[in-house]
Amino acid sequence: MDYRIEKDTIGEIKVPSDRYWGAQTERSYENFPIGEEKMPKSLIRAMAVLKQATAIANNRYGKLDNTRCELIKESAQKIISGQYSEEFPLSVWQTGSGTQSNMNMNEVISHIGNEIYKEEILHPNDHVNMSQSSNDVFPSSMHIAAYKEIKEVLLPSLNYMKEVLIKLEKENEGIVKIGRTHLQDATPIKFSQEIMGWRGMIESSINQIEITCDKLRYIPIGGTAVGTGINAPEGYGKVVTEILNDLTGLDFISEENKFYSLTSKDSFVFSHGALKALAGNLMKLGNDIRWLASGPRCGIGEISIPANEPGSSIMPGKINPTQVEALTMVAVQVMGNDTSIGIASSQGNFELNVYMPIIIYNFMQSVNLLSDAINSFTKRCLEGIKINLDRMNFLLNNSLMLVTALSPILGYEKSAYIAKKAFEENTSLKDVVLRENILTEEEFDKIINPKNMI
């Protein structure tokens, strides 16, 4: 392999000649051969757009000339478009401040810019990192990536699911079925009401996510090393944030208390808590659907779901609820991520949290997994749900819990006796009531009408 020699404050190091990164990236690449997890692409894009904003701000302050500003902007835009994704190879398991990833970005932008200009005009630290520190760049990029992906990817997927549930709710308005609590028969319910419960969970999750992700809008850029803003001009954070909003079309806010924003990552804990709540709702929704679709002949079998692929390598014709299984596995992963994020957030010793890479990796993994799983489940399962009306009616009409309607008339103990007798004799409530002359057939039919019990 061909190499070139790069230098940093430690000394010389060999860098593959076809790579756009420099000495500090190479040192990190060699020193942290840990795992397969790399920095999220969304974080890389967020950092690139932040570098555009900081370059424009530095230019406005008169610190960066027009030529270098334009080169940084052009180089960063190429990264945002995905042209240089292979130039960001660093492991999540690196320095806890993300310094090496910030330098990775600085070095790649410099190299691209110098290649465009055909002269060594950009320096990673002096120009691309001007008025900045990794300690405010990396967490600001975390906020940008997290907020942007939630707004532009996760929430649209949830709204898609909500619209499909609204459609299912309307389509099944008049269908009455048996309700269940504790996995046992309960009183009747409309299938549309059951779907209404699912829809309410998704609407609640959307609301919770919107509330909690609002805190992610506050970014610490301008705080530099320890929150004092050393080497940055007065008001730099606000200027960069205004430019950032123009570039992204979003509504970020410059955090006034930079000391807090560098050391605390509570906004990620808070926001991810809503993602964990969503995961819990998705787990419940998925479990409901696979229970209701269980069978097709030896389970509940009240609904059928799309047959997307064979379910067994040995049992011909078997179809499994695979989209549910994928969705619920994602839910479990998100719950685990929440624990990691909470513990990592507590490690903000003194002026800086040094667990930031694992926080943003797990956070973005949760956002991306949830978005993909919700879209896949909605498209390949939820949209294709069909009711099995005969099975619903059979289970409804044979449920012993219809006896609940007799309780106000006959009393709780007498009604319980009827239900127990019917169960023991494997007969219907009506058979017991008529045989023991408790009610006439006309009286029974008037009282025990599932449509009047919803």
Image (cartoon, rainbow, N blue to C red):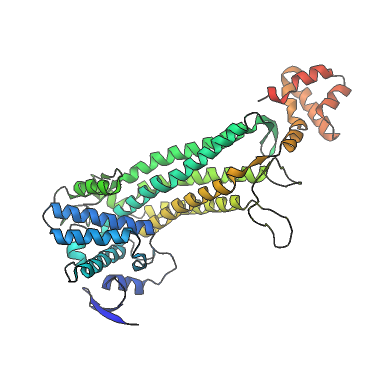
**Relative depth, front residue between 391 and 330:** 391
Provide residue 285's location: percent of width, then percent of height.
Answer: 58, 42
Q: Is residue 134 above or below residue 212?
A: below
The N terminus - image quarter: bottom left
Provide residue 443's location: percent of width, then percent of height.
Answer: 80, 17
Most extreme residue toward the left, as rendered? 62
**Relative depth, front residue between 293 and 346:** 293
Q: Is residue 317 above or below residue 160?
A: below
**Relative depth, front residue between 335 and 178:** 178
The C terminus - image quarter: top right
Q: Is residue 107 above or below residue 81?
A: below
Q: Is residue 53 left or right of residue 331?
A: left
**Relative depth, front residue between 25 and 351:** 25
Most extreme residue toward the right, as rendered? 435
Most extreme residue toward the bottom, as rendered? 1
Residue shown at 62% from the left, 53% from the top: 322
Q: Is residue 354 visible?
A: no
Residue shown at 53% from the left, 53% from the top: 330
Q: Is residue 258 above or below residue 138?
A: above
Residue shown at 16% from the left, 47% from the top: 235
Q: Is residue 405 left or right of residue 3?
A: right
